[in-house]
Image (spheres, rainbow, N blue to C red):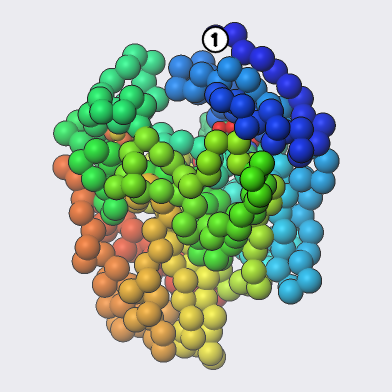
Amino acid sequence: MHPFAYTRAATIAEALAVGAQAAAAYLAGGTELLNWMRLGIAVPQHVVDISRLADLDRVEPLPDGGLRIGALTRLNDAAQCTEVVRDYPVLSQAILKAASAQLRNLATVGGNLLQRTRCPYFRAEELLPCNKRVAGSGCAAREGLNDRHAIFGWTDACVAVQPSDPAVALAVLDAVIVTEAAGGGRRIPAREFHTLPADDPASDNVLVPGELIVAIELPAPAPRSAYLKLRERESYEYAIVSVAVALDLDADLIRRARIALGSVAHRPWRLDEAERRLVGCRPGSPEAIEAAAAAFTDARPLAHNAHKVAMAKNAVLRTLRTAAGMP
Ligand SMILES: Cc1cc2nc3c(=O)[nH]c(=O)nc-3n(C[C@H](O)[C@H](O)[C@H](O)COP(=O)(O)OP(=O)(O)OC[C@H]3O[C@@H](n4cnc5c(N)ncnc54)[C@H](O)[C@@H]3O)c2cc1C
Ligand code: SF4
């Protein structure tokens, strides 16, 4: 590993001051950053340890009935928090499906959103053509092995997917990412936080250098919500596809549906058209099946991942029923 300076920040102001320097990187749980440094994917000259910053590891109620989750809250603490389990089950379930219990004890909610793609060409120990890693070098996955890659929103420059499970739940909950930066903070809608390759294949999200996530805010509770993760084994494995659903019901009819897919694009993929068509349908009905299918007419599978379309379609229908409390 290359030499680097290390500062343990005592305050947000100190973190922002050091974090604004060129080639600085924040360290939260370290479960991603240290791997990148070992692989040469990240070469920070200054590591700014934010893990001891006060007050960023709490879950607190908001006056409007929502919830504020500090960015340094450990994944397991967020998932097991009473209010999250009761009012936002989709988020609790998504977090508990991420990584392993040991990793979740260390990894933070903010850090999770900033994890990078698991594309094997990007993570390879030797340098392979990868526009995300070396701009202009090509995309080995486009014509290579791409069974785990995108079916929506890709370009020839990059076909990677964003692998975070919690991000999919946050997109469906219309959560807001709250940041601080030297020039002032921002409130970023979760569904606009991750970028698509058409913007810039090297980029992952809209944060600017030195910008610090301080919290994630959840609006009104979504007790009828659920997360389904389909993967090769039931533990310690990334998704092939995942689905987050939040429903408002009027008796047994859908008044409002929010649906997002994970591991199908470089950002959680909201199914706006299907959401519109599902209003007034009963989950599981032929009309609901037809409405959900509409979401996949513009899917563009790659050479090795057409199975993702069928898996995602069926996962949406199953998760709609689960969120509605149906068998
Ligand atoms: C083996 C393994 C399996 C995994 N499986 C899954 C899985 O199935 N599903 C899933 O969702 N995730 C999975 N993960 C990802 C894991 O959840 C992330 O590694 C973790 O959440 C990152 O959090 P961290 O606090 O350790 O981040 P760090 O490693 O400390 O930081 C990651 C990045 O975020 C930046 N950063 C961290 N906090 C902030 C902040 N507050 N503001 C601005 N920048 C910040 C850092 O500078 C760095 O660039 C897995 C990880 C591993 C290693
Ligand atoms: S899909 Fe993206 S991350 Fe993977 S090799 Fe292509 S450019 Fe790199």
Does residue 207 show up? yes
Expressed as whole percent of the image width and height from the top left, the position of residue 46 reads: 63, 20
- Say if 68 sits above or below 272 in the image: above
Expressed as whole percent of the image width and height from the top left, the position of residue 268 reads: 43, 55
Residue 52 is left or right of residue 264, and the answer is right
Residue name at image x 55 percent, y 30 percent: 32
- Label 1 neighbour load within 10 Å: few <14, some 14-19, many 20+: few
- Say if 108 sits above or below 31 in the image: below
Quadrant observed for ligand 2 in the rendered image: top left
Secondary element type, mark 1? loop
Amino acid tagged 1: Met
Expressed as whole percent of the image width and height from the top left, the position of residue 222 reads: 61, 71
Residue name at image x 58 percent, y 17 percent: 45
- Say if 278 sits above or below 122 in the image: below
Image quarter of residue 213: top right
Does residue 91 show up? no
Image quarter of residue 76: top right
Residue name at image x 26 percent, y 64 percent: 296
- Image quarter hosting the N terminus: top right
Image quarter of residue 84: bottom right
Total residue callouts: 1
- Given residues 156 and 84, the one toward you in this image is 156
Residue at label 1? 1
- Given residues 282 and 201, the one toward you in this image is 201
- Say if 202 sits above or below 21 in the image: below
